[in-house]
Image: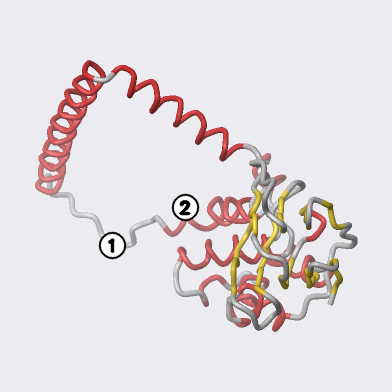
Amino acid sequence: MCHHANVFEIGNSLLEARTRRSIDINQAELATKIRAKYLRALEDERFEQLPSQTYIKGFLRTYADYLGLDGQLYVDEYNSRFVAGDEFDPRPRRSSARPQRRNRRAETIVVLASLVTITAITLVVVGAWSTSGAGSKNTANQTRSHTVKHTSIPPLPHAYLQIVAVNGSSYVAVHRDGPSGRLLFQGTIEKGRAEPFQGKTFWLNVSAPENLRIIVGGKTVPLAGYKPIALTVTPSGVHSD
């Protein structure tokens, strides 16, 4: 009963999000690089028309993020509803105990190999620790610093253009100079992450502007609405296309 209460319609919610943002299917195809027939298959939940589960999950995440939704939520919902059934092996099982003995032998070999590997790694770590205590402390400090960097928005004081995902994720494409210029970045900026860009002239395609903070020359650019926008950044300012 509780499981069904959390179920939502994957396809309908994707279609509603695209309709709400007034995005044409061909526009979505161009932005996500996913063929329109696959996008329609996702909206109709005709997953059998997609090449494989790997493609389905990747397409779901990319398309949902592009529409300003939570891509991981859609992947989790797909896994809970469809993957478990696909894991069933339709091939007939034999009653012979020989395969079981073979499996046990293989498992024993894997366990022994793992123990040997763990022992070797332990010896290496102990040796490194005993010969270089200071080096270990420096490594630990670097690891902590690296972890903090990935869980917070890093300071970017020298970047002319900064795109920060503050409210959620958003698909973003950044070109140098104009829409036909060199592609600098294309993908989803996850919540809590920031992308810096050096230079003075850019063209941006943003799918979910309400989730982003765009900073140009140290000043935040006001973004309104829930529809994808295209922005041109120049030394003289920012304007929407």
Residue 9, percent from left and from top: 70, 60
Residue at (56% x, 67% y) in the render = 59
Where residue 235 sits, quadrant-wise, is bottom right
Q: Do the residues bearing badges 1 and 2 touch, measured as CB atoms within 8 Å?
A: no
Q: Earlier in the sequence, mark 1 or mark 2?
A: 2
Q: Which residue is mark 1?
A: 91
User: Against 150, is 221 above or below?
Assistant: below
Residue 90 image offset from top left, x and y in percent? 33, 62
x then y, percent, for residue 165: 71, 50
| SS category of the residue bearing label 2 | helix
Q: Is residue 189 above or below residue 114?
A: below
- Percent position (x, y) of residue 126? 22, 19
Vertical placement of 238 versus 49: above or below? Answer: above
Who's the residue at 77% across and 61% down the image? 208
Please give the name of the residue rendered at 67% of the width and 60% of the height, measured from the top-left corner.
65
Q: How many marks?
A: 2
